Image (cartoon, rainbow, N blue to C red):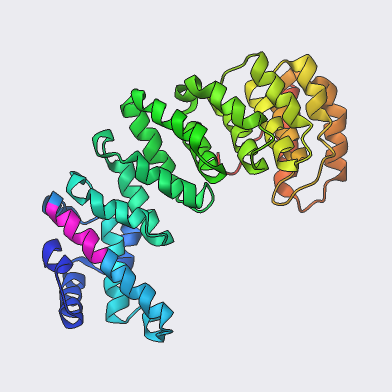
Amino acid sequence: MSLSKLANAASAEERSEALDRWEGEHGGAFELMAVGQLPEVLRPELTATVSRELLVAYAAARRRFLEAIELDDPSIFDVDAPESRFHMALYSIVQHLEGDLEEARPIIEELLESGDAEMMRVASGLMEKMSAAGFSFETARRTMARHGINEIPYKLGNAVANWVRADPARVAEIEAALVEGEDLEKQALCAVLQDLGEAAAPLLDRLLEVARSDELDPESRSCAISTLGALGVVNSLVSEAIEQALRSPHWFIRGNAAGVAGSLVLDPPHFIPLVMCLLEDDEGHDWSPSEKAVEALGKYGPAAVDAIGAIEALRAATESDDTWLLDEIERALALIRGDEPPPREDD
């Protein structure tokens, strides 16, 4: 069973028969997802036309799935039902498309703008593989403007960053979007700049405008503050922005500012006392400024020796089940004392 025949199965009966043959020859959707790639024998079939056909078929299968949900059709949740299996098989396949995707660009952009999380995830993953020549920044901008940083798959940010690396002149488009975009778009663009790292340094002034603006949503300012750490630029304007952020009324801005102070090792005599002030700042949820402060002080190393007593006091006051914070405290104390820090579990 070829990929093209699977993609072009039209009726429900044809799709069921095609899928049975496919699974008999190549395994089911879950086997494909577990392996994480297409069988080697199928790769020669991935012409530009076949890739487009598969994406069109996947989009149709996904829409049938969403329509069945709207109609409260319980069979759609039966993983053994033919339509569910067909949808899952195509979903497993299209994630691994490669090669020339230019012919498929219209359907990829359609998936990206669908508003459906799964289709957006597929599209952004494929856009990450596309060359700068096939890059439609306007499509990416529209998606960022609607969904911001938390709702869109991060691979879209990876894709935009990759395109800018391939064609550095396109940083001008990022700059224009950073100026013109509303809050959600600005937040998503900050993720792109974090991915670009030092390559985004030419946009430092624009980023500082976002970080210092009182007119923007605090989330946008927080994203901009975090991004300053990725750019790696240390100057008086950056220091002023971080100092202002350390005194923000918003806990997440304070915490992110502490993280940047540590990442950039900003003026130790001046910033270490400011960061130490956050050690008892436990406002927030999921994380707190105090946690960021501990990590930041560790990055200052021996220069933060005066913080040892305050960090040890925090350790004594920390609940025994807060293992993440206790581990970070031990790492910070080791770094400040000049010792080898214990490894993190994810290192």
Classify residue 205 by image quadrant.
top right
The answer to whether residue 213 is magenta is: no
* Image spot of residue 274 (x, y percent): 81, 25
Which residue lies at the image location 29% right of the left edge and 42% below the top edge? Answer: 129
Asked if residue 128 can be seen in this view, the reply is yes
Position of the N terminus, as image quadrant, is bottom left
Left or right: 207 in relation to 85: right
Q: Main secondary structure of the magenta part?
A: helix
* Image spot of residue 95 (x, y percent): 30, 55
Classify residue 54 by image quadrant.
bottom left
Foreground residue among 262 and 231: 231
Which residue lies at the image location 81% right of the left edge and 34% below the top edge? Answer: 278
* Image spot of residue 34 (x, y percent): 35, 60
Foreground residue among 150 and 42: 150
Which residue lies at the image location 69% right of the left edge and 19% below the top edge? Answer: 239
Left or right: 192 in relation to 123: right
Foreground residue among 116 and 80: 116
Q: From the viewer's perspective, is residue 297 above or below residue 112?
A: above
The answer to whether residue 52 is magenta is: yes
Per the rendered image, the range of residues in magenta is: 49-58
Classify residue 128 by image quadrant.
top left
